[in-house]
Image: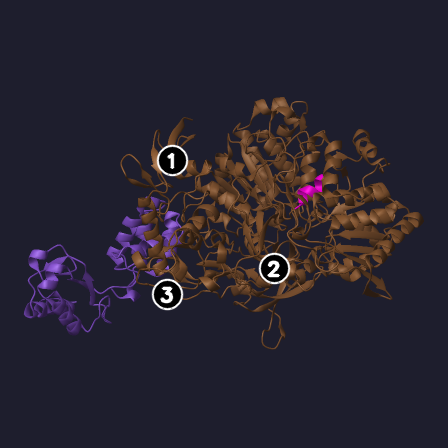
Chain colours: A purple, B brown
């Protein structure tokens, strides 16, 4: 998601729904993350206003959960597993290959906001090791050819847009 | 409540149900180490140092979060627990930088104390320092988060006690740290620099910015000398200098763990080079150093001579709402007993004393009927709070914390103020005057009075009145009711351009409740101040909001001993104990005690003194601890009239504006350098003793007054503060519960029971209404004068604080975005503001909270130049324009060439 394309109307629609619901902070943040792609830092104060919280408290929750991001993420978020089983099966080389292919370090987003590369401590799919996720899709038993084809698929996806 | 019995370390103890194990243990003298626990914060269970072991099962509990239960058998120092504690401290030390030698927390560091107790010096763990940049750009607080142990005390104090919400935890795990929004420096966050986090921080992560390194040589308890809250302080002293100030953390004290930026950081003014250190006598038009004997001799001779020549009425005494009760008592005793004049007033004239007298005057007999709401802690039990014309976040921040905490507890808050300020965001309903520049009508003057009238009418129409209260305690209700109902609501709404919708909501919220009023300085300085106050008192009577727990009036006292100076008779119309001058019986009480005659008629108040000086009928004035040449409007006029006096005595601690016109200058002592007592805005008398010596040859003010009395031939007036307390308590029965000074309360707090108002009936005041006033088209803007939290009053003392003078706030005039656009103003542009009486020049900043048509001018900055714009006229008098606002015109001054451009 390109940060210049923040849909502020959508944003106020979401916050409007949760007006005054102190307990609703996490669902609200999830909705924003989902629909905008990230939580714009400049929106923290207005989220806090909506829920009668201090802005510092809202920021605290956002920075606590890795599920929330204050930086724009790519359209496709790659999560490469770094669990033990994947490690044994060569997960490290898979990660290195993706890094080289996308020219991204861990936690980085490509300048065209197509890809964000992340790692996860364990995806819980050890029987598929080495594994990774792209958005909500699992890709297991990876090898260099499969990785290239998966990445290609998501690049192609970009081409179609 | 059930009592629970349990055993800790073999000792059988008992505690009420609901207490934690830690609280139970501490109340019986069993010490359990802890880092994240503080008695005024919610228990948190973060540090795990307060572990105790259940002897039966061997389980470990964090005692701060575990409720004590019947028949528990616990150990607080078993080998297993000690092992755990040592591990916890070792882990903390592994992450802690090795900077203890230069750390300002020094011997007060709780982490170091516990490490020392557990014998952890050399750590066997691999050091894992967590370096963070040192933040020290602001002049108040140094943040070194590499020393943070994540106890969360600063965050909890911020959220639970002062409700500023400037910081919270960021991130998680090893990276976790307290952070401001967007990790900006504190001065760019919502931090108010109250310093509560600094004194509550158990390590050196947060410390006061100071040149001094290490631990103070000694600490002594004191009472803050700035605003009327009367916070309990602990002064850290090295040699004869105060190096740091902290709240005393005394449970049930008015401030407990909190303070404000002034109390915490502005006391460095005491070390100013401008302190008066020796007596000065004017010789050949120049103030020259003199001996005490010479200075006192001159004063005694001159005053007696002027009294002989021009009569006692030609001498006036201006006491101080900053000096102690004992000093004010002796001061007015000298005036009334020796000089035989009732021309006694204090600086409280400006800061709300008139309001107190007005409220008190409503009872048929002074002191019997208590309109005052008593302790501030009552706010947290109020039914509804109504704040009018006050911005406590700036003038009395600790009161602001009380209000915000009350809101957090769900107590509805109604705010009526000019629309800017932190309370607005916390309120259920906020009502603001309209500054619509489209009409040339002045809506500000009429605002408060019409608002109260409308609320009263509507409550009446709803029959939301307390009839049983009124029939028992009041008279004149029927007439009041008829008058009120005959008010044309539409006219009222129009006169003040009020938002009727907001008023309806406020009435719904107020109906059927006892109201707690918090009234502020802005109201007191209003054109219709007196009428507003009377309308409020009527409203309080109508709703029965008096004598009821927590309800009544909190009158915001801007100065530490405003109430005390009033109580002690430093006013023209009452004697100590608020006894009336014009009442024969009252007067007799003090005449007998002083073995003298007291003049029968009331004396001159501060304004009348100036007028009489101008007319040449006042010849001498004795000013103690006040700086009228800085605090009063139209200083040029004032200067002329005071300079024309034959003889002026100024007794003060700083070389201030008023000293320049004095004939004799006496160096007094600040609160930290003498003993005495202050009465705070709750009516609580709190004693203090000296922490250090007065500088140079300065003397305590009480001593000075005694010496003057002696020189004038009345050596029996000379007395110690204990002697004076005895003198007062043996004369006034209400002051009889004198206790030793060890106890912070000298006399009991004023009685809050409804029972003792039976004998009196309170009259309703006549209904008053405002007149429409029109703007002078030459002066199209309304300037509102506001205090900022960095300065107190006119800034005589806070100006000398280096920290305050180096902080970011430079007293910029605030304008609304609409007006800024109209005048083509951006931040840091200079403007010239002109009123009928004077002008000033300052830079501006644009604030979107300001309403169009208004500009906000902070007082106390630039030698308090704001007072040039205000007209010197009597306060609480509808013929004058009031001191809180005035009409002005604005011209943009060219920043580059200083050339003026007409806009």
- What residue range appears in magenta? B561-567
Reading the image, the residue beneath label 3 is B131
Q: Quadrant of residue B631?
A: bottom right
Query: CA gap, disc 3 to disc 1?
Result: 40 Å
Asked where in the image residue B595 lies, by quadrant, the reply is top right
Q: What residue is shown with label 1?
A: B8
Q: Quadrant of the N terminus of chain B?
A: top left
User: How many other residues sit within 10 Å of disc 2, few (<14), some (14-19) or many (≥20)?
Assistant: many
Q: Is residue B356 left or right of residue B623?
A: left
Instruction: Note whether B389 is above or below B54 in the view shown.
Output: below
Indicate the chain on which mark 1 is placed: B
Residue A106 x, y percent position in the rendering: 22, 67
Residue B347 in magenta? no
**Discs 3 and 1 carry the same chain letter:** yes
Q: Is residue B888 visible?
A: no
The nearer-to-camera label among 2 and 1 is: 1
Q: Are marks 2 and 1 on the same chain?
A: yes
* Residue at 72%, 43% in the rendered image: B721
Main SS of the magenta part reads helix
């Amino acid at each position: 998601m390109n940060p210049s394309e923040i849909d502020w109307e959508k944003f106020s629609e979401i916050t409007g729904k949760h007006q005054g619901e102190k307990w609703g902070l996490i669902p609200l943040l999830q909705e924003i993350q989902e629909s905008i792609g990230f939580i714009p830092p400049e929106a923290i104060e207005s989220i806090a206003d909506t829920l009668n919280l201090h802005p510092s408290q809202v920021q605290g929750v956002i920075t606590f959960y890795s599920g929330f991001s204050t930086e724009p993420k790519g359209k496709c978020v790659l999560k490469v597993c770094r669990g033990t089983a994947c490690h044994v099966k060569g997960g490290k080389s898979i990660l290195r290959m993706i890094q080289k292919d996308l020219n991204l370090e861990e936690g980085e987003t490509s300048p065209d906001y197509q890809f964000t590369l992340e790692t996860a401590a364990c995806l819980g799919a050890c029987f598929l090791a080495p594994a990774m996720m792209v958005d909500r899709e699992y890709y297991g038993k990876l090898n260099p050819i499969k990785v290239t084809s998966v990445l290609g698929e998501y690049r192609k996806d970009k081409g179609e847009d | 409540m059930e009592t629970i019995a349990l055993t800790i370390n073999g000792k059988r103890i008992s505690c009420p149900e609901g207490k934690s194990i830690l609280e139970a243990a501490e109340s019986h003298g069993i010490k359990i180490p802890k880092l994240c626990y503080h008695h005024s914060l919610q228990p948190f269970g973060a540090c795990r140092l307060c572990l105790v072991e259940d002897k039966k099962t061997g389980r470990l509990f964090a005692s701060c979060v575990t409720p004590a239960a019947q028949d528990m058998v616990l150990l607080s120092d078993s080998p297993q627990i000690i092992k755990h504690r040592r591990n916890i401290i070792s882990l903390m030390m592994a992450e802690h930088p090795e900077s203890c030698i230069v750390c300002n927390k020094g011997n007060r560091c709780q982490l170091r104390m516990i490490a020392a107790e557990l014998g952890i010096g050399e750590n066997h763990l691999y050091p894992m320092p967590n370096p963070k940049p040192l933040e020290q750009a602001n002049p108040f607080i140094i943040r070194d988060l590499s020393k943070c142990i994540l106890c969360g005390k600063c965050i909890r104090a911020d959220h639970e006690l002062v409700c500023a919400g400037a910081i919270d935890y960021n991130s998680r795990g090893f990276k976790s740290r307290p952070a401001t929004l967007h990790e900006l420096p504190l001065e760019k966050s919502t931090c108010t620099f109250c310093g509560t986090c600094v004194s509550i921080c158990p390590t050196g992560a947060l410390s006061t910015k100071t040149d001094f390194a290490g631990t103070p040589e000694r600490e002594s308890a004191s009472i803050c000398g700035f605003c009327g809250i009367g916070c309990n302080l602990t002064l850290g002293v090295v040699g004869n200098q105060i190096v740091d100030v902290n709240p005393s953390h005394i449970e049930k004290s008015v401030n407990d763990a909190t303070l404000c930026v002034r109390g915490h950081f502005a006391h460095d003014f005491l070390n100013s080079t401008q302190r008066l250190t020796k007596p000065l006598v004017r010789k050949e038009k120049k103030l020259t150093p003199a001996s005490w004997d010479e200075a006192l001799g001159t004063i005694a001779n001159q005053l007696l001579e002027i009294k002989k020549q021009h009569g006692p009425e030609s001498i006036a005494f201006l006491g101080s709402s900053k000096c102690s009760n004992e000093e004010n008592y002796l001061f007015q005793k000298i005036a009334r007993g020796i000089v035989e004049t009732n021309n006694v007033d204090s600086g409280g004239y400006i800061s709300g004393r008139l309001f107190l007298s007005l409220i008190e005057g409503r009872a048929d007999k002074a002191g019997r009927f208590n309109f005052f709401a008593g302790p501030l802690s009552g706010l947290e039990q109020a039914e509804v709070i109504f704040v009018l014309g006050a911005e406590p976040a700036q003038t009395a921040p600790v009161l602001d914390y009380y209000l915000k905490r009350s809101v957090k507890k769900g107590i509805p808050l109604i705010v009526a103020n000019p629309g800017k300020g932190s309370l607005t965001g916390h309120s259920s309903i906020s009502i603001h005057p309209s500054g619509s520049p489209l009409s040339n009508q002045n809506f500000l003057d009429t605002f408060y009075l019409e608002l109260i009238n409308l609320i009263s009418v509507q409550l009446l129409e709803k029959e939301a009145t307390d009839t049983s209260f009124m029939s028992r305690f009041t008279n004149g209700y029927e007439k009041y009711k008829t008058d009120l109902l005959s008010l044309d609501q539409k006219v009222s709404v129009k006169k003040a351009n009020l938002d009727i919708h907001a008023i309806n909501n406020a009435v719904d919220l107020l109906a059927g409740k006892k109201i707690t009023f918090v009234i502020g300085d802005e109201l007191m300085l209003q054109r219709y101040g007196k009428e507003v106050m009377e309308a409020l008192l009527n409203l309080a009577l109508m709703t029965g909001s008096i004598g009821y727990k927590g309800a009544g009036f909190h009158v915001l006292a801007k100065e530490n001993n405003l109430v005390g100076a009033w109580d002690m008779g430093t006013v023209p119309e009452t004697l100590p104990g608020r006894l009336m001058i014009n009442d024969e019986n009252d007067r007799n009480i003090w005449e007998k005690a002083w073995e003298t005659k007291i003049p029968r008629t009331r004396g001159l108040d501060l304004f009348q003194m100036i007028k009489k000086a101008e007319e040449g009928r006042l010849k001498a004035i004795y000013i103690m601890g006040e700086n009228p040449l800085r605090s009063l409007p139209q200083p040029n006029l004032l200067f002329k009239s005071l300079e024309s006096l034959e003889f002026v005595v100024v007794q003060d601690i700083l070389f201030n504006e008023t000293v320049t016109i004095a004939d004799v200058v006496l160096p007094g002592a600040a609160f930290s350098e003498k003993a005495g007592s202050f009465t705070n805005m709750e009516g609580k008398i709190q004693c203090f003793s000296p922490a250090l010596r007065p500088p140079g040859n300065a003397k305590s003010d009480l001593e000075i007054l005694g010496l003057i009395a002696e020189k004038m031939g009345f050596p029996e007036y000379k007395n110690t503060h204990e002697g004076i307390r005895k003198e007062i308590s043996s004369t006034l029965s209400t002051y009889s519960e004198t206790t030793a000074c060890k106890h912070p309360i000298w006399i009991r707090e004023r009685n809050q029971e409804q029972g003792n108002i039976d004998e009196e009936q309170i009259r309703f005041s006549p209904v008053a209404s405002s007149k429409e006033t029109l703007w002078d088209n030459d002066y199209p803007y309304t300037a509102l004068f506001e205090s900022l939290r960095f300065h107190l009053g006119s800034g005589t003392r806070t100006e000398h604080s280096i920290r305050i003078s180096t902080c970011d706030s430079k007293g910029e005039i605030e304008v609304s975005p609409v007006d800024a656009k109209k005048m083509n103003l951006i931040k840091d542009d200079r403007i010239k503001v002109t009123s009928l009486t004077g002008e000033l020049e300052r830079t501006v900043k644009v604030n979107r909270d300001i309403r169009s048509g208004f500009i906000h001018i902070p007082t106390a900055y630039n030698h308090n130049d704001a007072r040039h714009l205000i007209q010197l006229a009597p306060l609480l008098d509808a013929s004058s324009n009031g001191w809180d606002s005035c009409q002005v015109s604005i011209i943009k001054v060219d920043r580059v060439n200083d050339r003026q451009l007409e806009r």
